[in-house]
Amino acid sequence: MDTSQAPPGETDLYAAHKKIYPREVSGYFSRLRSLSLIILLGIYYVTPLLQWDGRQAILFDLPARKFYLFGLILWPQDFIYLAALLILAGLALFFFTALLGRVWCGYACPQTVWTEAFLWMERKIEGNRGRRMKLDKAPTSAAKIRTKVLKHAVWIAFSLWTGFTFVAYFTPIDVLASELLSFNLGPWETFWILFYSFATYGNAGFMREQVCKYMCPYARFQSAMFDSDTLIVAYHPERGEPRGSRRRNVKPAEVGLGDCIDCNVCVQVCPTGIDIRDGLQYECIACSLCIDGCNEIMDKMSYPRDLIRYTTENSALGKRQHILRPRIIVYACILLLLCGLLVGHISQRIALDLDVIRDRNTLYRETRDGLIENVYTLKILNMDSKAHSYRLWAEGIDGLKLVVDEPEILVEAGAVQQLVVRLQADELNLEARSVPVNFHLQAEDSNHLKTVEEARFVGPGKS
Amino acid sequence: MSSLPLDEIPRGQQAISVLWPSFIVAIVASGVFFSAFNPRDLTPYNLDIQVSPLAAYSIGFFLFWLLALLSSLGTMYFTISNCRFLKKQRN
């Protein structure tokens, strides 16, 4: 491959990494973004603390193989819901990307959320962009070491808290906290806390925009979901060019320049270190900080705002803009349909499962009354969030008798109960050697909670 | 298409492009595998192994990661060596 013909923009991609010092900025979009980040961080750290029915509200209990989602308890056989949820999430990403562009990248992606949190701590400790750059260039000194140690200590503490919270989604947080406080954490819990903390520290502290550039698959294929009506962050070259510096309050026309004063604020605020004036680039995570940065400058210059703004390709070219377009409508319809199916299916889900295993040691035996008897082991799985007592009956043979030794079939919430029962039938009523019978199980307090399971009844057969 | 020969991509990025996709594949594989099989019911090679569920899930995850990693490593190796070979032929 001949590299000399490569466009310069592409070869830059693989140049040695230059550390990016995003400049702080304030404005409408940066406030909106901060709000989104705070809410998302809050959800992450608060969720394991929520309680429901005397247990953790959201818990992925791996040892017991149960997922608790508030009132819903999901079992491995409900894996289909998880798969459906993932498909829904994927479709939602398609839908929102087509409509709003990379709003996920700029406002909601964990990589963005934690990077911003780490940047915030960095700013509080090391100061603004200029001070951070000066500090990194400065020769090693006691003050520099102090600042750096403090920053990394705060980062590590925050990472450890993040790792602890992550593991608390799998081990109840009260158990985890008491184990931690008594230095009694299990080896794997310790490992995963450290693993997740390390990943947070590395990704949010050091890798930052490189994760988006080199590791994120979405960044590479999102352009496939874009069309000319997708919301993008764009510079207005007709208005801005030719760019050039000038004194304040000078009218652009007087000096033969466009509105862009080439102050580079848009480049300095960019967390991925690109120049939005070069056009739409795949490094752009649509965080819109350059919009705020530029608007601030435009205000100072008394020029109209929105030299860099949210727009669409069509509206930037002065064409008609279509929000409702086939792509959006199709995505929305599929999304709604799947959502409806999922909600409908979960609400119709019967939180009860019955498994019948025929005793394999003896085919059948004869009782003292001359009846043919089969023994079965029943496994009753109560997937509901509260205990139920159940009514059990069997049918399939005339005069079939069910013998249950327990006076009441009571199964705790989320428990499996084994039950040995016997079926008795008169030999005269058996039409074949092996006859199908049905076990019916129904909760005493609900007409909805019922299930049927087929089994075989074996007798001596017609002679 | 990248405009830069693959074998000139920095080591760090090579490492990530092997580690990272295999990590994602391992998450998916563990999810599918362990939703179907309870580690308590598994006795690999008839060995009597007593480990906690969390250990079983973790070890399972790392085995999947290792497998996917080997595959990614193979792809990376062959791509880079083919790239070098083609370059040599051309020169």
Image (spheres, rainbow, N blue to C red):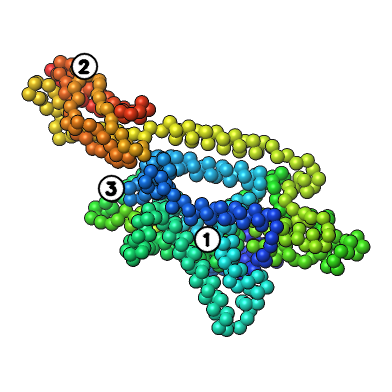
Q: Amino acid at mark 1?
A: Ser
Res A364 visible: yes
Q: What residue sits right under mark 2 in the picture?
A: A398
Q: Residue at x 63, y 50 (%)?
A: A103
Quarter of the image for residue A266 reads bottom right
Give the vertical position of A139 relative to A185 (above or below): below
Q: Mark 2 belongs to which subunit?
A: A
Query: Which element type, helix, strand or loop, lies under badge 3?
Result: helix
* Res. A328 mark: none
Of badges 2 and 3, the one in the foreground is 2
Give the tally of numbered discs.
3
Is A435 placed left or right of A29 in the picture?
left
Quarter of the image for residue A416 reads top left
Query: Which element type, helix, strand or loop, lies under badge 1?
Result: helix
| Label 3 crowd bin: few (<14), some (14–19), many (20+), radius 10 Å | few
Q: What residue sits right under mark 1 in the picture?
A: B17
Q: CA distance from mark 2 to mark 3?
A: 39 Å
Q: Position of residue A447 (x, y in %)?
A: 36, 26
| Label 2 crowd bin: few (<14), some (14–19), many (20+), radius 10 Å | few
